[in-house]
């Protein structure tokens, strides 16, 4: 299977997720190689547990991890992904839920690049909204920035009492 034919499950959002997936595949590959070196008839321990992310990755890409070719192709793809995938950094005021990040990843993969990775940061000072950073762009969509952009309007509203009086 060619590298450009692989897809990423939505559970793999960040570079860290991709590195964990690669590490997990490497551990599984090493276990299977060691098992092949044992004498025939030797009882094998159970296979290492795999994550839902690796399961989804193998299902989405129709891989059989018992086949060395599939493991090697997946490992090569993941190595290239970690090194070369487009990455954006999004900072929120608080930790976003996994479901929310899956929606964000889905949108970016449909609109920007099917292999984009998203690193999430926390920046409590933004209050609400988010900041987005790429290699050469920075965008601030935070409430803090909106208040800063409209400072004079806010100050004028505070200084000038409204014409309506409470009853």
Image (cartoon, rainbow, N blue to C red):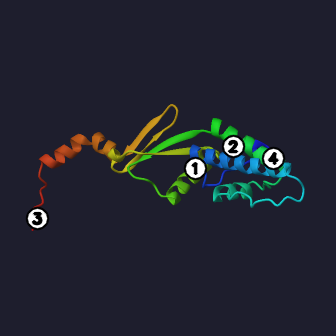
- The answer to which image quadrant residue 140 occupies is top left
Q: Residue at x 68, y 55 (%)?
A: 54
Q: Nearer the viewer, mark 4 or mark 3?
A: 4
How far from the left and from the top, in percent, is residue 46? 74, 61
Q: Nearer the viewer, residue 153 or 11?
A: 11
Return the disc, 4 or 2, that comes first in the chain's sequence.
4
Q: Secondary structure at mark 2?
A: helix
Within 10 angstroms of label 2, few (less than 14), some, or many (20 or more) residues?
many
Q: Are marks 3 and 1 in contact (CB under 8 Å)?
A: no
Q: Earlier in the sequence, mark 1 or mark 4?
A: 4
Q: Could you tell me which residue is drawn at 78 percent across and 56 percent down? A: 62
Question: In this picture, is 164 found above or below 22?
Answer: below
Mark 1 = which residue? 13
Q: Where is residue 9 shown, x and y percent of the image?
A: 65, 54
Viewer-side residue, 132 vs 119: 119
Which label was assigned to residue 78? Answer: 2
Q: Secondary structure at mark 3?
A: loop
User: Which of the two discs, 4 and 2, sits closer to the camera?
Assistant: 2
Which disc, if any, is residue 1?
4
| Distance Cα–Cα, label 2 vs label 3 | 64 Å
């Amino acid at each position: 299977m060619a590298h450009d034919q692989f897809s990423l499950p939505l559970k793999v959002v960040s570079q860290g997720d991709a590195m964990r997936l690669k590490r997990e595949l490497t551990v599984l590959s090493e276990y299977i190689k060691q098992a092949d070196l044992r004498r025939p008839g030797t009882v094998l321990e159970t296979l290492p547990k795999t994550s839902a992310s690796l399961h989804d990755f193998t299902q989405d890409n129709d891989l059989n991890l018992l086949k060395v070719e599939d493991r090697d192709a997946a490992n090569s793809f993941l190595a290239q992904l970690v090194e070369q995938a487009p990455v954006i950094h999004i900072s929120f005021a608080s930790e976003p839920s996994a479901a929310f990040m899956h929606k964000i990843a889905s949108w970016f993969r449909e609109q920007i690049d099917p292999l984009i990775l998203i690193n999430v940061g926390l920046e409590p000072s933004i209050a609400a909204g988010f900041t987005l950073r790429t290699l050469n762009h920075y965008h601030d969509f935070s409430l803090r920035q909106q208040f800063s952009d409209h400072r004079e309007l806010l100050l004028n509203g505070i200084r000038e009492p409204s014409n309506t009086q409470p009853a």
